[in-house]
Image (tube, rainbow, N blue to C red):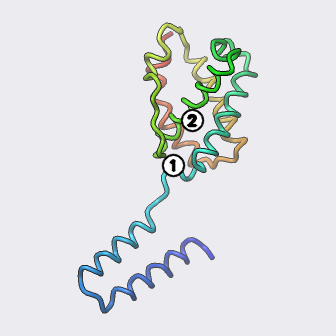
Amino acid sequence: MTTRRTLAIFAVAALAACESKPAAQVDSAATAAATAVAPQSLYDRLGGTTAIASVVDAFVANVAADTRINARFSRVAGDTSAMRQFKQKLVDQVCAGSGGPCTYAGLDMKAAHQGMGLTGADFDAVVEDLVKALDGAGVPQKEKDELLAILGPMRADIVTK
């Protein structure tokens, strides 16, 4: 059954249920119907925390293999605990930024990248590695574009050269 047909059936059922009810019950049914057809958050469309964590794992593996940028991550690359924390912060950041229930408790991007002297080419390489991870996970173009639109403005706080 298509989504459009399912919504139409749901709407007809909601209207039928409202026909002989007092106004308060009609308002309640209308609110329930509106809530039921509300668009899913980007977080939900990405597949939730588990799917985001999977993309982060692939992203970090892509960065580790990318000679253009991997030296910039040497601080966490050799430390299992630091890498685990780094990945969790990335998951929390994407989760929170995409409308999920997570809270990002890391540094703001300006403070986190202060003194690193990152260039536009460095940032672009990281974005390419992220897109490769998203593609590998089968994330649709619309969701990729939305996520990149959320993360893109961070460039101004990350790139200093």
In the rendering, which numbered label is found on residue 59? none
Helix, strand or loop at label 2? It is: helix
Occupied quadrant, residue 91:
top right
Image coordinates for residue 60, horizontal then vertical, percent: 68, 27
Above or below residue 11? Residue 155 is above
Q: Is residue 125 above or below residue 22?
A: above
Residue 37 percent location from the top left of the image: 45, 67
Label 1 secondary element: helix
Dot 2, how many residues are within 10 Å of its Cα: few (below 14), some (14-19), or many (20+)?
many
| Disc 1 and disc 2 in contact, CB within 8 angstroms | no
Task: Say which quarter of the image contains residue 136.
Answer: top right
Residue displayed at 67% across by 40% down = 54
Q: Disc 1 residue type?
A: Leu
Residue at horizontal 47%, vertical 45%?
101
Residue type at the position of mark 2: Val
Can you give x and y, in whole percent of width and height, for residue 47 in the image?
A: 60, 50
N-terminal-most mark, 1 or 2: 1
Q: Which residue is mark 1?
A: 42
